[in-house]
Image: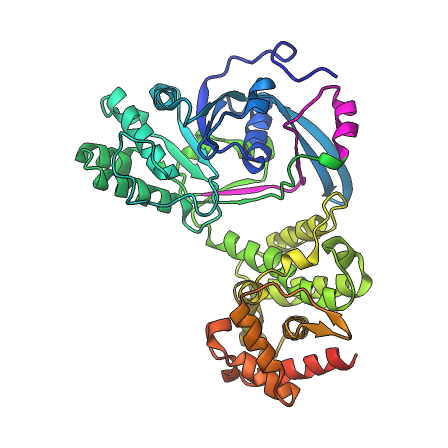
Amino acid sequence: MQLLSRSTFPPSQRPVRILQFGNGNFLRGFTDWMVEKSNQANVFDGAIHIVQVHSKSANNPMKDQDCLFHVIEQGLKKGKLVQESTLVTCIAGITNIFEEYNEYLKLGENPDLRFVVSNTTEAGIVFDPTDSSIDRISKTFPGKLTALLYHRFKTFNGDDSKGLVFLPCELIEGNGEALKECIQKYISFWKLPMDFSEWIDWKNIFCNTLVDRIVPGFPKGSIEELQEKIGYKDDMAVMVEPYHFWAIEGAGTIQEEFPLDKTGLNVKFVDNLAPFRTQKVRILNGGHTAMVPYAYLKGLRTVREAVENPEIGTFLNEAIYDEIIPTLDMPREELEQFAHAVLERFANPFIVHELKSIALNSISKFKVRVLPSLLAYHELKKEWPEKLILSFAALLVFYKGSYKGMETPINDSPELMSEFKAGWGLGSTEATVTKLLSERAYWGEDLRRYDGLVESVSEAVDQLLQG
């Protein structure tokens, strides 16, 4: 079977307007796919150059395929099964920073360059004081980026029009602000000119962003069938779910320069990311976390099995629509549309998502994702939400370590597991629940102060243990 190459798919003559730090599955199945779609729709005209920042050697499969690859969408969308492939042709080149550092710096000389996209993991946006000089390759992504920006600044003599727009996709709150702060720390640490620091401050735009898409990556189990359909050998194919979401904060006029939303993509340019982050944490992540322990105790093992189970499916729907959504300060119609998409994502037949993998560190997840909805519902309705209370009880029973002769796959810190074991060694359900809910280290506060919470959770625990 013929390998993908530019001899078969000649490159279109588009200016390189985007510098992308990272060549992982996520960016290729998210940003690169969006840019390809936007180029095809003639709402954007730009190519991407990729920079490898972690690997010490070049990505040979990417180069062998002339930076061509397919993005394979598989899943449910508005109730219909989707299986679509898109050939991504918008990658103009790839540079390994360790093998071609001077070539990397020259990328900053491109007058057409306007955007910088990155996904260097949550730990990627950091400052490292052991990076002692700009003349050496920095250990961190912000340090490497500072060197390129300084080269660009000198090349264009501080031209105001050569500032860039930064769209970091790392999953940390305030990712744009954090990136800018790290760059300024390097400027100060390396004693670079004040006018460069001011150019960064005033002529570059650092946007906070929020991204969402499940990208399983290379479709190993179905690649032969997929290659038969596309007619080419593709070692860089990326499987993604149909759902995607990109919110970009504080972009000002950037929407006109980067109009991905005009392609019909789920991209929003917003003044405040907070409501969208809360929506995602409470409904998507909260739905996962609320469902997992209860579904596991009921003998289910994957997300898809859980949402297709009549009892658990009803439980999850009622928890989201009746108990979580009423506590959120966004238009209900928008929240319900998001919730519908979430439930479709959970039911994706192409993704096997095991409950035990989601159960990792469930206590800290429950504190952030579910507990705020539970407490907000009580404040709003003056009663405890039945489904979220049941979820809380199931979590405590799950952390007991066994249920009806079955071990539960607790995966948490040894200290926490030991404390839960001691809590379950007390004489009664109410004593156990009282002890566990009093631990500020778990929940951020002593939950005994809420009238009726201990009693409601204890009753639900008894129902699970006796059921």
One can see residue 376 in this view: no
Considering the image in quadrants, where does the N terminus appear? top right
Residue 84: x %, y % from top left: 72, 31
Q: Left or right: 46 with respect to 178?
A: right
Residue 247 on the magenta segment: yes
Number of numbered discs present?
0
The colour mode here is rainbow
Q: Who's the residue at 44% across and 33% down the image?
A: 53
Rendering quarter of residue 307: bottom right
Q: What is the span of residues highlighted in magenta in the rendered image? A: 222-248
Q: Left or right: 266 with respect to 210?
A: right
Q: Left or right: 195 with respect to 280?
A: left
Q: Who's the residue at 71% across and 21% down the image?
A: 233
Residue 102 on the magenta segment: no
One can see residue 5 in this view: yes
Vertical relation: 461 (above or below) 275: below
Vertical relation: 287 (above or below) 144: below
Residue 321: x %, y % from top left: 67, 62
Residue 467: x %, y % from top left: 79, 79
User: 347 or 382: nearer the eye?
Assistant: 347
Residue 95: x %, y % from top left: 45, 23
User: 373 or 463: nearer the eye?
Assistant: 463
Q: Who's the residue at 64% across and 90% down the image?
A: 427
Vertical relation: 311 (above or below) 130: below
Q: Furthest-top residue in view?
A: 7
User: 44 or 232: nearer the eye?
Assistant: 232
Vertical relation: 356 (above or below) 462: above
